[in-house]
Structures are given as C-alpha cells and as structure tokens.
Image (cartoon, rainbow, N blue to C red):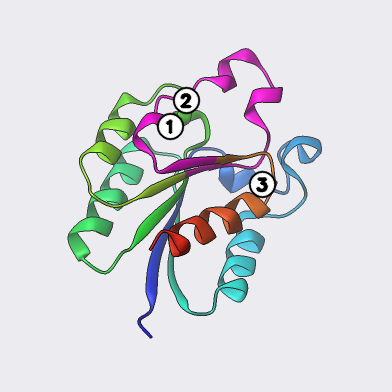
Amino acid sequence: MSTSAILVLNGPNLSRLGKREPEVYGSRTLDDINRELAESFPGVAFDFCQSEEEGVLIEKIFQAEDGGACTGVVLNAGALTHYSIALRDAISAVKLPVVEVHLSNVHAREEFRRTSVISEVCLGVISGFGPRSYHLGVRALLERG
C-alpha cells in the first residue's frame, strides 16, 4: 500500500485559531487541527504549512507539484479566498487536486465571505463543519481514486 502525501495549506490569520473569534472558529488551535489530522489518517504523509503571505502559499503549491510526491492539497486560504487572483492562477497552473475548506459556513456570514475566486478551480468546497472540514477535505482527496 502506497502512502498518500497531502499538503494542508492555511492562509492569513489561521495562525490565530483558538484565540480569534472562538464563537465563530472554535477553540482548537491550528496545531490541534494538524495533530488530529495526522492521528486520524496515519497512512498519509502530511506537509502542514501556514503563512500570512500570499506568495509563500503560491510557492508551496508549486513545490508540492514539482516534488512529485504530493497527491493533493487541502486549502483554507482565509481572506485570500475572496480576492486572490494570484492564488487562483497558481491552483490553475498545477495538476494537483485542491479542496477548498473553511471552518465556518461562509454562506451564513457577511456578504463578502460568500464569494470565492478560487472555488471554480478547486476539486470541491467544504464549509461549515469546523475542524471536521479538514478531515472531510482529506477524505475527499483519498477517495478521489
């Protein structure tokens, strides 16, 4: 059985999970979410990355494809979801499947959060299940076949 390799990529402000608006995003930290993913999917080699900088996220996507071992990306782009054409273009530039995830139900929030410029170039979108959104994203990649 071969090991799957998945990049879990997080954008701006997700480093503040556990502190930032816990009524919206919950009390778990990003480290908690990453640890729970690794424990739940022991057959997956995860590469976890969080950055406040758009360019770092783009470079990680390119490196994931160029390295050849990555089978997909779970991406919570944070605020970049709503306006980063550069991130959208990076996703379009690779053949890796990308699953867009969000902790909160973005469609039940402010109007501007309901627009994603990256959704059209992603395999799918999972939103509103808290940390479980990441688990569902990983499962979607693993079951893709």
Which x, y percent locates residue 47? 41, 65
Q: Earlier in the sequence, mark 1 or mark 3?
A: 3
Residue 46 in the image, given as x and y percentages of width and height: 44, 68
Q: Secondary structure at mark 3?
A: loop
* Residue placed under numbered mark 2 in the picture: 116
Q: Give 124 or 11, whichever is nearer the viewer.
A: 124
Q: Nearer the viewer, mark 2 or mark 3?
A: 2
> Does the magenta portion include 133?
no
Question: For mark 3, what is the residue?
Answer: 17
In the rendered view, tell whether residue 4 sits above or below residue 80.
below
Q: Is residue 122 left or right of residue 116?
A: left
Q: Residue at x 75, y 35 (%)?
A: 24
Mark 2 to mark 1 CA distance (whole Å): 6 Å
Residue 119, label in figure: 1
Residue drawn at x 58%, y 22% is 113
Given the current orientation, which residue lies at the most extreme right position? 23
Question: Where does residue 125 sit, x and y in percent of width and height?
Answer: 51, 39
- Number of numbered discs overlaid on the protein picture: 3
Q: Does 15 appear above or below 37?
A: above
On screen, 121 above or below 107? below
The Cα atoms of the two marked residues, 1 and 3, are separated by: 23 Å
Query: Which residue is pictured at 33% across the width and 34% down the height?
Result: 87
- Residue most extreme to the top: 111
Amino acid under label 3? Leu
What are the residue bounds of the magenta stretch? Answer: 100-125
| Amino acid type indicated by mark 1 | Ser
